C-alpha cells in the first residue's frame, strides 16, 4: 500500500499535468512559444514525477514489479496515456487534444491515490496476467485518443453547421476522423486479446465471475466493433462513429472502476 509521502508526490504529478493542461487551454488567447514550451515542460515533468512514484513504490516493496498492484496500474495507465498524447502532438500538433486527455490523466492519478489507499488490490505476477494488463492498458490509451478525436469531431462539426469558424487548434474533420479510426484500429485487437485472456483466466482459476466488468467489457467491444467497421457502412460514418467512440470510452472507464470495486475483478 502506498505511503502518505508517495501520495504527496503523486499529487505533485497531478499538479504538473493540471498546469500543463491549463497552459494548453490558455493558448487560445495567447499562443506564444513560452506557453507552448511551458505546457510541454509541465507534461514531461508530470511524467517523470509519476514514474518516480512508481520506482519509489517498487523500492518500498523490496522487489521490482512493473505492475504489482492497482496503485501501480492506474499510474502506469496515466503515464502511458500522457506519452501517447505527447507522441501525437509531436508528430502533428493538435492543441485541443490536451483539453480532453489531461483531465483523463489527472483522474487516473487521483484514482490511484484513492483506490491505492482504500481499495488496495495486489496483482499476481503471472505471464498471462501481465499480457492481459498490458493489452488492456495500451488499448485504453488508444481508445482515449479515439474518444478525444471523436469529441473534437462532434464539436467541430457543430461549429461548421452553425457556420462558425473552426480554429486550427481543432484540425479538419478529415484529420479528426482519421485520428479516431487509427486509434480504434490499434485498440480493438488489443481489447479483444485482453478479453479472451481474462476470460480464459477466470475459467482456468475458477474465480468468482465479475459480472459487471464482463458486461461492460462486452459492451465496449461491441461499440468499437461498430466504429471499426464504420467505413464499410455509411450510416455509421462521421458524427455517429465519433459519438460511439466517446460512448465506448465512457463504458471502458466504467469497466476500469468496476475492476477496482468488484472482488476478483482487478486481476
Image: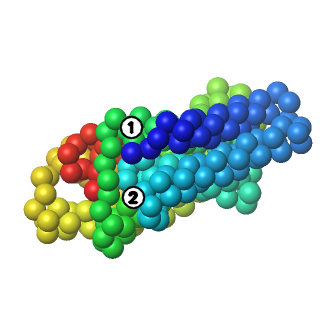
Instruction: Give the structural element (helix, strand or loop) at label 1.
Output: helix
Dot 2, crowdedness within 10 Å: few (<14), some or many (≥20)? Answer: many
Left or right of residue 52, residue 245 in this image: left
- Residue that label 1 marks: 117
Left or right of residue 37, residue 191 in this image: left
Indicate which disc, 1 or 2, sits on the residue closer to the N terminus.
Answer: 2
The Cα atoms of the two marked residues, 1 and 2, are separated by 14 Å
Instruction: Give the structural element (helix, strand or loop) at label 2.
Output: loop
| Image vertical order of residue 69 relative to residue 127, above or below | above
Left or right of residue 220, residue 64 in this image: right
Locate residue 78, reporting x and y percent.
53, 48
- Residue that label 2 marks: 68
Q: Where on the picture, by quarter, is residue 118?
A: top left
Q: Where on the picture, by quarter, is residue 230?
A: bottom left
Rendered residue at 44%/61% (across/down): 62
Rendered residue at 79%/33% (across/down): 27
Locate residue 79, reporting x and y percent.
56, 52
Q: Is residue 50 visible?
A: yes
Q: Is residue 252 visible?
A: no
Quadrant in which the C terminus appears = bottom left
Dot 1, crowdedness within 10 Å: few (<14), some or many (≥20)? Answer: some
Q: Which mark is residue 132?
A: none
Left or right of residue 110, residue 195 in this image: left
Locate residue 216, reporting x and y percent.
27, 46
Rendered residue at 70%/33% (across/down): 19
| Image vertical order of residue 154 relative to residue 135, above or below | above
Amino acid at each position: 500500500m502506498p505511503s502518505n509521502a508517495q501520495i504527496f508526490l503523486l499529487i505533485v504529478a497531478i499538479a504538473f499535468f493540471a498546469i500543463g493542461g491549463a497552459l494548453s487551454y490558455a493558448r487560445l488567447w495567447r499562443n506564444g512559444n513560452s506557453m507552448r514550451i511551458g505546457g510541454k515542460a509541465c507534461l514531461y515533468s508530470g511524467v517523470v514525477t509519476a514514474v518516480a512514484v512508481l520506482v519509489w513504490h517498487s523500492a518500498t516493496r523490496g522487489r521490482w514489479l512493473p505492475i504489482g498492484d492497482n496503485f501501480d496500474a492506474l499510474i502506469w495507465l496515466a503515464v502511458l496515456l500522457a506519452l501517447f498524447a505527447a507522441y501525437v502532438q509531436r508528430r502533428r500538433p493538435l492543441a485541443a487534444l490536451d483539453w480532453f486527455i489531461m483531465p483523463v490523466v489527472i483522474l487516473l492519478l487521483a484514482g490511484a491515490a484513492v483506490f491505492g489507499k482504500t481499495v488496495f488490490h495486489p496483482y499476481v505476477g503471472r505471464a498471462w496476467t501481465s499480457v492481459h494488463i498490458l493489452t488492456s492498458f495500451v488499448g485504453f490509451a488508444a481508445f482515449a485518443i479515439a474518444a478525444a478525436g471523436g469529441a473534437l469531431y462532434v464539436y467541430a462539426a457543430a461549429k461548421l453547421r452553425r457556420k462558425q469558424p473552426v480554429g486550427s487548434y481543432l484540425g479538419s474533420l478529415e484529420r479528426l476522423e482519421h485520428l479516431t479510426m487509427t486509434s480504434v484500429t490499434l485498440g480493438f485487437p488489443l481489447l479483444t486479446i485482453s478479453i479472451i485472456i481474462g476470460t480464459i483466466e477466470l475459467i482456468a482459476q475458477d474465480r468468482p465471475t465479475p459480472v459487471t466488468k464482463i458486461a461492460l467489457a462486452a459492451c465496449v467491444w461491441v461499440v468499437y466493433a461498430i466504429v471499426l467497421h464504420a467505413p464499410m457502412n455509411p450510416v455509421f460514418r462521421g458524427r455517429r462513429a465519433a459519438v460511439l467512440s466517446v460512448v465506448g470510452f465512457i463504458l471502458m472507464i466504467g469497466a476500469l472502476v468496476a475492476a477496482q470495486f468488484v472482488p476478483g475483478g482487478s486481476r
